Image (cartoon, helix red, strand yellow):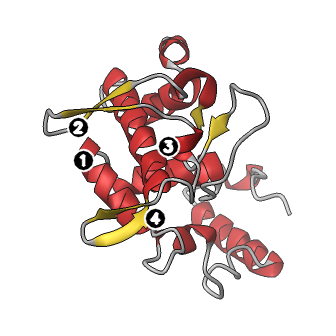
């Protein structure tokens, strides 16, 4: 099927090629089943945001997103991109990301970070295996719900970094995501092109 084939006989005649192209594309999509499985099973994103998620990510993400003035959907999207919602995710090198939001160990671990909340308050936090590894830091309560403290710490640190990236990018989501993943210098270089 060539959906983008130009019909020379119709050019300039004012014919309704958009409707015909749409019908052709729809028939092709239906013939190969594109999108047919989405409604039949829960997606990975649906499982992550569900209130029955084993890590209670909905509670954690909504809490920290609000504290840092972020849209929870943006935070969830970053978690899906960085770790597929696996709080145990990490690479093998010291420069690879760690946890739900893929914060780099070589940059953040064992270095005190000053977290800046949207209400103007600050908090010092030192990321390390002791404060970020799931199951090893006990629990904490967020909005009346008990959650794993270190999984919460992963999202807290990631939201702080995402907020900083968005600030550098003047809240431009595209530029902010570049800054989060590649650094401020890369963001300026890419955006200036």
Q: Which residue is mark 3?
A: 131
Percent coordinates x, y for residue 169 in the rendering: 37, 24
Residue at position x 25%, y 52% in the image: 66
Is residue 69 visible in the rendered image? The answer is no
Percent coordinates x, y for residue 185 in the rendering: 51, 11
Q: Earlier in the sequence, mark 2 or mark 1?
A: 1
Q: Which residue is mark 1?
A: 67
Residue at position x 42%, y 32% in the image: 161
Residue 3 vertical placement versus 153 (above, below): below
Q: Earlier in the sequence, mark 4 or mark 2?
A: 4
Distance Cα–Cα, label 1 vs label 4: 15 Å
Distance Cα–Cα, label 4 vs label 3: 17 Å
Density class for disc 2 (Cα within 10 Å; few <14, some 14-19, many ≥20) is some
Q: Which residue is mark 2?
A: 117
Determine whether the residue tagged by mark 2 lies in a helix, strand or loop.
Answer: loop
Percent coordinates x, y for residue 85 in the rendering: 59, 59
Is residue 107 visible in the rendered image? The answer is yes
Determine whether the residue tagged by mark 1 lies in a helix, strand or loop.
Answer: helix
Density class for disc 1 (Cα within 10 Å; few <14, some 14-19, many ≥20) is some
Residue at position x 49%, y 55% in the image: 151
Distance Cα–Cα, label 3 vs label 2: 19 Å
Q: Earlier in the sequence, mark 1 or mark 4?
A: 4
Please name which of the two marks, 1 or 3, marks the residue nearer to the observer.
3
């Amino acid at each position: 099927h060539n959906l983008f084939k130009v019909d020379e006989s119709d050019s300039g005649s004012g014919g309704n090629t958009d409707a015909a192209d749409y019908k052709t594309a729809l028939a092709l999509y239906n013939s190969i089943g594109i999108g047919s499985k989405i409604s039949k099973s829960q997606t990975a994103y649906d499982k992550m945001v569900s209130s029955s998620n084993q890590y209670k990510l909905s509670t954690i993400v909504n809490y920290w997103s609000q504290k840092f003035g972020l849209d929870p959907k943006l935070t969830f999207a970053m978690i899906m991109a960085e770790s597929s919602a696996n709080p145990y995710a990490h690479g093998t090198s010291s420069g690879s990301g760690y946890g739900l939001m893929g914060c780099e160990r070589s940059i953040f671990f064992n270095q005190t970070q000053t977290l800046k909340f949207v209400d103007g308050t600050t908090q010092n936090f030192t990321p390390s295996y002791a404060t970020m590894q799931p199951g090893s830091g006990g629990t904490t309560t967020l909005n009346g719900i008990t959650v794993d403290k270190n999984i919460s710490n992963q999202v807290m640190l990631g939201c702080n970094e995402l907020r900083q990236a968005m600030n550098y990018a003047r809240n431009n989501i595209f530029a902010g995501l570049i800054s989060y993943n590649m650094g401020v210098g890369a963001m300026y270089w890419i955006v200036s092109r």
